């Protein structure tokens, strides 16, 4: 059986599970970035304050796109923070003021997200789901470039 967009319903269900996991990861990533943006202190405040804002603005767009992809695949996106906390592989961070530590947290969170996006990309390929594959491919390219830049920032 296929859904309305021609994806096998069983594969779409598996994709939705993984997309909801990514959605939860992005929600925690977003909230961590907000906390870093608000609480960062020190000589790198101005540049990191702006950079964390750039990252959380990007994350909020991806959150919406992921949820809409779940709906496109005839699933239901997670939408309660308790579900995000229970599902995400990313831990919430509190009280981080040090810029270097903040950048390391962003890199760790991104590493988790990249692994999930690669897994979804493979699932989407197996399901012949070009829409999800294209989305994940774009996200991966951006995340990998961001990781390179953050590694370079830390030296």
Image (cartoon, rainbow, N blue to C red):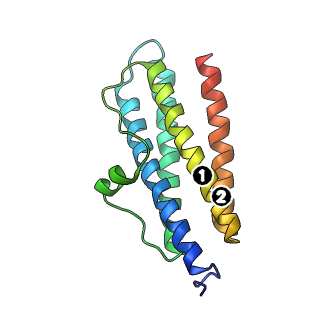
- Mark 2–mark 1 CB contact (< 8 Å): yes
**Taking 42 as reference, is 145 above or below it?**
below
Query: Which numbered marker is on residue 27?
Result: none
Q: Position of residue 82 (x, y in %)?
A: 28, 54
Q: Is residue 90 above or below residue 106?
A: below
Which residue, as the protein is rendered here, is positioned at the far bottom?
A: 1
Question: Residue 41 location, x and y as percent?
Answer: 38, 18
Number of numbered discs: 2
Q: Secondary structure at mark 1?
A: helix
Do we see residue 32 in this rendering?
yes
Please rate how many residues cluster around mark 2, counting C-alpha atoms within 10 Å: few if below 14, some from 14 to 19, many from 20. many
Residue 69 seen in this snapshot: no
Which residue is at a point 56% across and 50% down the rendered structure image?
116
**Mark 2 residue element:** helix
Residue appearing at x 56%, y 80% in the figure: 9
In the image, residue 2 lies at what x, y percent? 61, 85
81 relative to 60 in the view: left or right: left
Res. 111 image quadrant: top right
Q: Position of residue 141 (x, y in %)?
A: 69, 45
Per the image, the residue denoted by label 2 is: 121
Q: Label 1: few (<14), some or many (≥20) within 10 Å?
A: many
Instruction: Quickly name the residue at label 1.
Output: 117
The residue under the point 53% across, 46% down is: 58
In-front residue for pair 105/41? 105
In the image, 90 versus 53, the foreground residue is 90
Residue 114 in which image quadrant: top right
Mark 2–mark 1 distance (CA, rounded to whole Å)? 6 Å
Q: Can you say which quadrant of the picture contains the C terminus?
A: top right
């Amino acid at each position: 059986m296929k859904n309305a967009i021609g994806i096998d319903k069983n594969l779409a269900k598996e994709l939705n599970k993984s997309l909801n996991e990514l959605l939860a990861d992005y929600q925690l990533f977003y909230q961590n970035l907000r906390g870093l943006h608000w609480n960062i202190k020190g000589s790198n405040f101005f540049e990191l304050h702006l950079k964390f804002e750039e990252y959380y603005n990007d994350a909020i767009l991806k959150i919406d796109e992921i949820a809409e992809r779940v709906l496109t695949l005839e699933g239901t996106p997670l939408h309660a923070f308790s579900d995000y906390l229970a599902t995400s592989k990313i831990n919430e961070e509190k009280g981080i003021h040090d810029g270097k530590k903040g950048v390391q947290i962003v890199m760790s969170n991104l590493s988790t997200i990249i692994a999930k996006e690669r897994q979804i990309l493979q699932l989407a390929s197996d399901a012949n789901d070009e829409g999800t594959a294209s989305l994940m491919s774009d996200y991966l390219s951006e995340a990998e470039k961001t990781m390179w830049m953050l590694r370079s920032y830390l030296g």
